[in-house]
Amino acid sequence: MIFFDVTKTGWARHRSGLTRVSSRLAEELGAAAAPVRWDRGAFRPAHGGGTLDLRPADWLLTGELFSEEERPGLGAFIAAKPCRLAAIFHDNIPLRLPHVTWPQSVERHPGYVKLLAGFDRIWAVSAVSRDDLLGFWQWQGVASPPPVEVLALGADFTRQPRETRRPPAAERPALVCVGIIEPRKNQAFLVETCTGLWDEGLDFTLHLVGRVNPHFGRKILKRIMALQKRYPGLQFHEAADDELLRWIYGQVRASVFPTIAEGCGLPLLEALWVGVPCVCSDLPVLRENMAGGGCLPAKPDDRAAWRTALRSVLTDDAVVSRLAEEALTRPLPTWAQAAETLRRELDRRSV
């Protein structure tokens, strides 16, 4: 039996990357995995309460972040190991970029990674994340770390079929940037870059889609709101659901992803799924997903490089058509495939 941890996913209403991974995997695992949550010092059925009869051959699978502070008694549970334990690891960004990460996350992340070392199987969301995790364990002196493999996350952000052709974009050129409003996602850099293009006379719309990080994002939001008074092409959508986002994708010539650090980069994959090219930061982790085509990389925080790339997708129909064709025709992973990988591997090791 597979038990799937939905302790946070069950009540979260925002569309963060971690929430999206857990919710989409839960959907695709379906009846093959029973949802559970950590409650009062134990894992319990997500619906109805009660207790779980965990057996040594069972698997507990989690895609969430956790700590002893959030889940008192979890360390003892992992040490006792009443069943087999598997986890999806996202990134070590709290350790690599503490200045743009929630202070609580920075404080608790080392403990989280130590707890992961007690698991039986780990899937990382990218090769970069896998290497970060293994490197940290080596630095911590973990003698016998569990095996870590890479799990290709799904590009299908809705359960609708993949686009087979690129719908015509709006007459006015438009771009979209999806991600929580915070320094790591680098929307402030993007907006300032776009103001230079607007000042040059380029007429286009920039859609910013994402909730505001309450710790880091308010200053960025204030700047966005101020610039909207001068640049009507700047549009902000804080509470966009999948339906609105899909509509926005149908209006734009390209998505833009100026992030400075990622575990995987789901917005890039999701844009490609609907045939929308992506101008993205030239980061090692994003190269894992841009190699198949449909992407135009630009050096992170290089304003000249980004202005050139954005001007290209805004004004050059041939470039956009080529990139869109690459996006539409390249193979992309699905959440059904990711769930099947997990189910197959866990079932194989339960025999």
Image: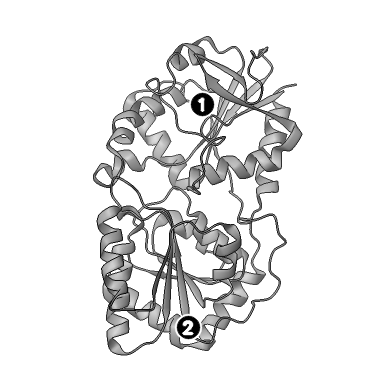
User: Residue 108, relative to residue 160: is it above or below?
Assistant: above
Q: Earlier in the sequence, mark 2 or mark 1?
A: 1
- Give the foreground label among 2 and 1: 2
Residue 232 point in image, percent of width and height: 36, 79
Q: Residue at x 63, y 41 (%)?
A: 25
**Image disc number at residue 210:** none
**Dot 2 and dot 1 residues touching (CB under 8 Å):** no
- In the image, 344 versus 247, the foreground residue is 247
In the picture, which quadrant includes the N terminus? top right
Residue 15 point in image, percent of width and height: 50, 49
Q: Is residue 57 left or right of residue 76?
A: right
User: Residue 339, relative to residue 140: is it above or below?
Assistant: below
* Local secondary structure at mark 2: loop
Q: Is residue 1 left or right of residue 134?
A: right
Residue 142 point in image, percent of width and height: 39, 22
* Local secondary structure at mark 1: loop
Q: Which residue is mark 1?
A: 146
Residue 232 appears in view: yes
**Image disc number at residue 173:** 2
In the picture, which quadrant includes the C terminus? top right
User: Residue 92, relative to residue 211: is it above or below?
Assistant: above
Q: Residue at x 53, y 87 (%)?
A: 171
Name the kind of residue labelled 2 in the image. Pro
Q: Residues within 10 Å of mark 1 (few under 14, many from 20)?
A: some
Q: CA distance from mark 2 to mark 1?
A: 49 Å
Snapshot quadrant of residue 349:
top right
